[in-house]
Image (cartoon, grey):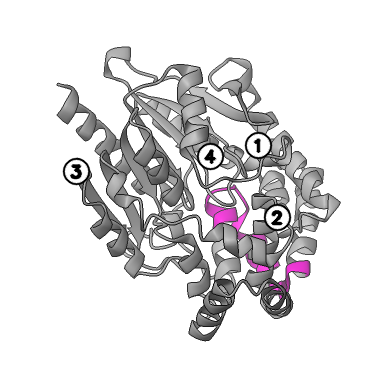
Amino acid sequence: MKTDFKTGTHMFHKEPNMNYTLNRIYSVNGGDLAEIKTAAARIKTIDDWIKEFLGLAQKALAENRQMNAAAYFRAANFYLSCNDQRKRDTYEKYVSLMRDIYREEFKKGIIRETRVSFADGYLPVWHVEAAGEKAEKNTVVMHLGYDSIKEELIPVLDYFRRANIDFYLFEGPGQGEALHKYNLPMIHEWEKPVEAVLDYFNLNDVTLIGISLGGYLAPRAAAFEQRISRVIAWGVMYDFFDTVLSRRGKFFEYLLKTLLFLRASTVINIIAGLKMKRDTYARWGIEHGLYVYGVKTPYEYFIKLKMYSMEKISHLVKQDFLLLGSTHDHFIPKDHFFRQAGALINVRSFTGRIFTKHEKAENHVSFGNMQLVLDCMIGWIKEHSRRYNT
């Protein structure tokens, strides 16, 4: 497999979320640095973004640069509205390209595919077996967050496999194939899809990893599923509602909280509509949220967000806990790391790690230095597995 993790954060664009996503296209998805820089200079709006990356995807395809083409289809897909047919088209083109790039891994059974029945659909699961001696292996189950796709993390599967870890990656409700193909909206009771996966594969004593919004989902599951022995929040998500509002300004935050308390749905929908017209990030966030949660209005979306909070359930988590943060996360309020750490009063052990700009890992979930983060998680998993299993 290809595990060429790129290191460093680039200043591609002045808009923080676009700049982060451009870095993600480069460091995670396999885009070309020069092409991304050129495209970024021409992007002013979401429509510009879509036009630029669809053009780059077609150019890369014509030149038989599959990984670059896949990266650009993923980039275009990221900001496309769920009401645009191109949303599904670019998703399918991205997935098809990635499967072609890694066709030998699927053909040889290095990556084994399973679909686990859940609600009215299925949860797709990829499994790779530990590359070393079976007696040494640990078992890890990982899931995604708010906007990831499992195909983006194929190199991560291989990295864990080579570290002698039996690794399962699944897409839950509201994520990737479970959403696009089976129309399963996201649920906050994440112990339910985790339970389905653990039951199907008869797994016990696992480490559960959740990335980004998974920083809520994984700890939530651990609070109610005791077959999880260790939990890693790959990104802080103490309270999703507060996180989303924190970047919109104090006035908007207080206004929205008051209107939600008053259940003023019509007013909220009007205000959110106006905000979406002026704010690129707000437009993407709300449109994506409507799709992920299977709701129709901004009011319903905000009601859903309020369910994703660890504030009232952190004390129920009793496993070993690794909390990963970063110093220049454009999305997560800085105090959320410490609020989450302080609320985990009953965990068996707690380890906190904040990655820095000096380490080139300062951005959200530290995509600027993936190898550093993976090594940190793997070392922690093995240390804590030995501590309680010898």
Q: Amino acid at mark 3?
A: Ser
Question: Mark 2 — residue?
Answer: 295
Image location of residue 23, percent across then percent down: 54, 60
Q: In terms of image quadrants, where is residue 368?
A: bottom left
Q: Amino acid at mark 1?
A: Ala
| Secondary structure state at the residue bearing disc 2 | loop
Question: Mark 1 — residue?
Answer: 178
**Contact, mark 1 vs mark 2 (Cβ under 8 Å):** no
Neighbourhood count class around disc 2 (C-alpha, 10 Å): few under 14, some 14–19, many 20 upward: some
Q: Which is nearer the eye, 319 or 40?
A: 319
Main SS of the magenta part reads: helix
Label 4 to label 2: alpha-carbon separation = 28 Å
N-terminal of the pair, mark 1 or mark 4, is 4
Question: Mark 4 — residue?
Answer: 153
N-terminal of the pair, mark 3 or mark 4, is 4
**Contact, mark 3 vs mark 2 (Cβ under 8 Å):** no
N-terminal of the pair, mark 3 or mark 2, is 2
Question: Mark 3 — residue?
Answer: 349
Q: Amino acid at mark 4?
A: Leu
- Residue visible at 70% across and 61% down? 287
N-terminal of the pair, mark 1 or mark 2, is 1
N-terminal of the pair, mark 4 or mark 2, is 4
Q: Amino acid at mark 2?
A: Val
Label 3 to label 4: alpha-carbon separation = 28 Å
The stretch of residues the image draws in magenta is 23-47
Is-magenta flag for residue 269? no
